Image (cartoon, grey):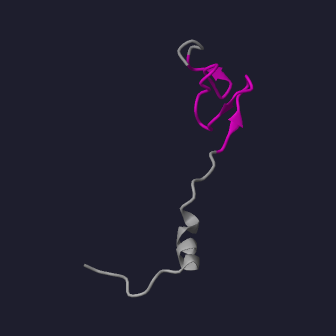
Amino acid sequence: MAVPKKRTSKSRKGMRRAHDKVATPNVIYCECGEPTLPHRACSVCGTYKGRQVIDGEDA
C-alpha cells in the first residue's frame, strides 16, 4: 500500500482544499417578494417569468 514519504504541511493542505468550498446559491426575488432560485417556479405563488405555471395551493 502506498504511504506518503513526507508529512503534508498545513499550508499545502490548505492550498489543496481552497477549491472545496460550497458555493453560495444565487437568489432572485419573485414578483411576490419571496427569494427563489433562478430558472425555477416560485414555491409560494407558483409563477415563472411573469405567468402562472403552478396553482398557488399546490406549490
Q: Residue at x 59, y 28 (%)?
A: 41
Q: Residue at x 62, y 37 (%)?
A: 37
Residue 13 x, y percent position in the rendering: 53, 74
Please identify the quadrant where the C terminus is shown: top right
Please identify the quadrant where the N terminus is shown: bottom left
- In this rendered view, identify the residue nearer to me: 37 or 16: 16
Q: Is residue 9 magenta?
A: no
Dominant SS type (magenta): loop
The image shows residue 8, relative to residue 17, as above or below, that is below
Q: How many marks?
A: 0
Image quadrant in which you'd find residue 57: top right
Q: Residue at x 66, y 44 (%)?
A: 26
Residue 46 x, y percent position in the rendering: 60, 21
The image shows residue 52, relative to residue 7, as above or below, that is above
The image shows residue 27, relative to residue 32, as above or below, that is below
Q: Which residues are magenta?
A: 26-54
- In this rendered view, identify the residue nearer to me: 43 or 15: 15
Image quadrant in which you'd find residue 14: bottom right
Q: Most extreme residue toward the left, as rendered?
A: 1
Q: Residue at x 60, y 14 (%)?
A: 56
Residue 54 x, y percent position in the rendering: 55, 18
Q: Is residue 10 left or right of residue 35?
A: left
Q: Is residue 26 left or right of residue 55?
A: right
